Image (tube, grey):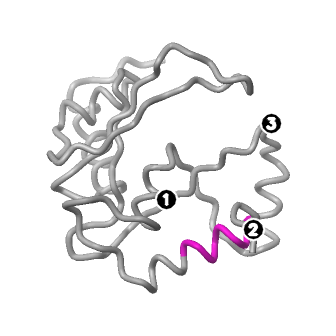
Amino acid sequence: MQRQTGQDMTDVLKKFKSIFEGLDIARGETRKTGEVSAKGKSITRSKTITEPPTDKMWQDHLKGTEPALGIIPIRRDNTCIWGCIDWDVYPLDHKEIVNDLKKKKIPIIIGGTGLYFNTITKGISKIPNIDTKTRNEVRSLFKKLGQIKA
């Protein structure tokens, strides 16, 4: 396996930042508490910080260094170029999830914490409101996936 050069890492960072561009005035931060839930999942604590993410935070996140960086997908102009839904049903049957998404014609979404969904559905102080249409579309996807009971 070839070792990546500094330029390779800079290119990877630029690519991730362009794919996962989000709000430039706030970010999420998640840390493991060291505890494990009864379901075997690491317990974490997340918070929103009203400061932009730095390149160092992105680099640390890509290396897997805590705290985990949370990018809020809704930008200041209320546009979004990516999104995710936190899937907290355990144990996970990945094949079943993929088949269900294909059957329901929902794009495959890979995500981290509930921060993103909560941001869209509830909003976070000092961050622009999410328009009703976008909020309802996300709720509809969640219902389709069986995550919200009708």
Residue drawn at point x = 83 percent, y = 60 percent: 99
Q: Secondary structure at mark 2?
A: loop
Query: Which residues, given as a range, are shown in magenta?
Result: 138-145
Q: Secondary structure at mark 1?
A: helix
- Work out whether 109 lies above or below 65: below
Q: Disc 2 marks which residue?
A: 149
Quadrant in which residue 31 is drawn? top left
Q: Between 69 and 133, which is closer to the camera in this rendering?
A: 133
Q: Amino acid at mark 1?
A: Phe
> Measured from the top left, where is residue 148 in percent x and y?
69, 65
Quadrant in the picture for the C terminus: bottom right
Q: Disc 3 marks which residue?
A: 91
Q: How many marks?
A: 3
Q: Disc 1 marks which residue?
A: 117
> Measured from the top left, where is residue 145 in percent x and y?
73, 65
- Work out whether 137 lies above or below 14: below
User: How far is mark 2 from mark 1, CA to CA?
Assistant: 16 Å
Q: Between 122 and 103, which is closer to the camera in this rendering?
A: 122
**Apparent side of residue 31 relative to residue 117 in the rendered image (left or right):** left
Mark 2 or mark 1, which has the lower sequence index? 1
The reply to whether callout 3 and callout 1 are in contact (CB within 8 Å) is no
- Work out whether 34 lies above or below 88: above
The residue furthest bottom is 133
At label 1, counting other C-alpha atoms closer than 10 Å, the crowd grade (few under 14, some 14-19, many 20 or more) is many
